[in-house]
Image: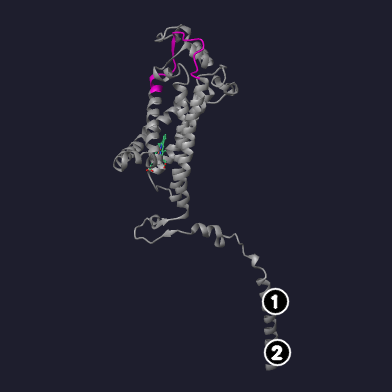
Amino acid sequence: MAMVCVHIRLVMAAIALLILTAAAPASAQQPSSLDPNANAVNEQQLLQEFERIQGRGSIPDAKSYVIEQPQGRAWRQYREVTLPLIGTIAMLGMIVLLAIFFLVRGMIRIRSGRSGINIVRFNAIERFVHWMTATCFVLMALTGLNITFGRVALLPLIGPSAFSSWSLFAKYLHNFLSFPFTIGVILIFFMWLVGNIPNRVDIEWLRRGGGIIGKDQPPAYRFNAGQKIIYWIVVLGGAAVAVSGYVLMFPFYGTTIAGMQLAQMVHGTVAVLFIAVMIAHAYIGTIGMEGAFEAMGTGTVDLNWAKEHHSLWLEQERARNGPGELQRQPSATPAE
Ligand code: HEM
């Protein structure tokens, strides 16, 4: 019996040895069973983690233990190089384009001259909301651009003491003006929504160059396609800077470091593009087109201006008020 047991043990040991020797070379020849792209061995990730400086801390805010990290360097590159580049190209590019356009096209005149009859275009509430939002926008643009460009463009000119006093004031102004600016954008959204819903007339207006490019005068209702584009840029751009701006203003309320970095990138990028568009808006509302500024200045426009730029709106106004009702105070410039 003992001999049988010894034989069984020997046979089992031989089988085990056979399995081991068969399996060992098989696994040794198949290193590819490991995924070289798996996170644990991703070389790119290892390189990115290089130069991460993180310590230990005693305060509850664990974010503060990280002194330096790869993602932070990528964000810093965007904030200090890419964003100022985008801003410079967009804003200076727009100014150069408008200057060339002005030299080529000049001011768009009222072709049939002034009629001497003014009609109401924007009431007092509309003008108040427009100018409140516009004033906030200009001041927020200047104080915001101080954050992006001030250290390079202004600090060498006025010195550290004046620059820090101005920057502190500018920062408070930027923060506090955010409230009337947000209210203004919301009011603009509701006040002019109906007139800014795109329709078929807009396609025709755009196809015919809007009377800005070329000499055509395509019909338009109260707002033409160009003004509708501006309206939606203000509403959507305003919402984007407001949401991202409040995330920056109340840091880490439900956001991480990555969330804060994203908010800064969205805020800065949308802001500089927004400023470039508003430069074009201000151009066409002043030196770009005769008779346009009055609409937001006094609230009235010349009848011939309305005929040439918003003929369908004029028809609507006539049908609503009767032709006599449209005639308000005679304009300062008599008809020629
Ligand atoms: C509700 C509206 C807004 C809020 C709450 C807001 C808030 C902020 C905050 C908190 C910052 C960061 C300041 C810092 O780094 O200390 C900032 C930066 C900035 N804001 Fe605004 N902002 C608003 C609207 C605007 C508008 C309308 C513009 C432009 C016309 C603008 C342009 C900028 C610019 C250019 C920066 C600097 C971006 C950078 O280089 O980091 N902001 N804003």
Q: Residues within 10 Å of mark 2 (few under 14, many from 20)?
A: few
Q: Residue at x 42, y 59 (%)?
A: 53
Image side of residue 77 versus residue 198, left or right: left
Which label is found at residue 220? none
Q: Nearer the viewer, residue 113 or 15?
A: 113
In this rendering, the answer to whether 151 lies above or below 64 is above
The percent position of residue 156, horizontal first and vertical second, equals 35, 41
Q: Residue at x 35, y 34 (%)?
A: 177
Q: Earlier in the sequence, mark 1 or mark 2?
A: 2
- Residue 199 visible in the snapshot: yes
Task: List the residue tagged with mark 1.
Answer: 22
- Disc 1 is placed on an element classified as helix
Residue 7: image tag? 2
Vertical side of 171 occupied by 37: above or below: below
Q: Residue at x 34, y 58 (%)?
A: 59
In space, the residues marked 1 and 2 are separated at their CA atoms by 23 Å
Q: Position of residue 78 (x, y in %)?
A: 47, 45
**Residue 324 x/y as whole percent:** 45, 6
36 in the magenta segment: no
What secondary structure is marked by label 2? Answer: helix
Q: Which residues are magenta?
A: 106-127
Q: Amino acid at mark 2?
A: His
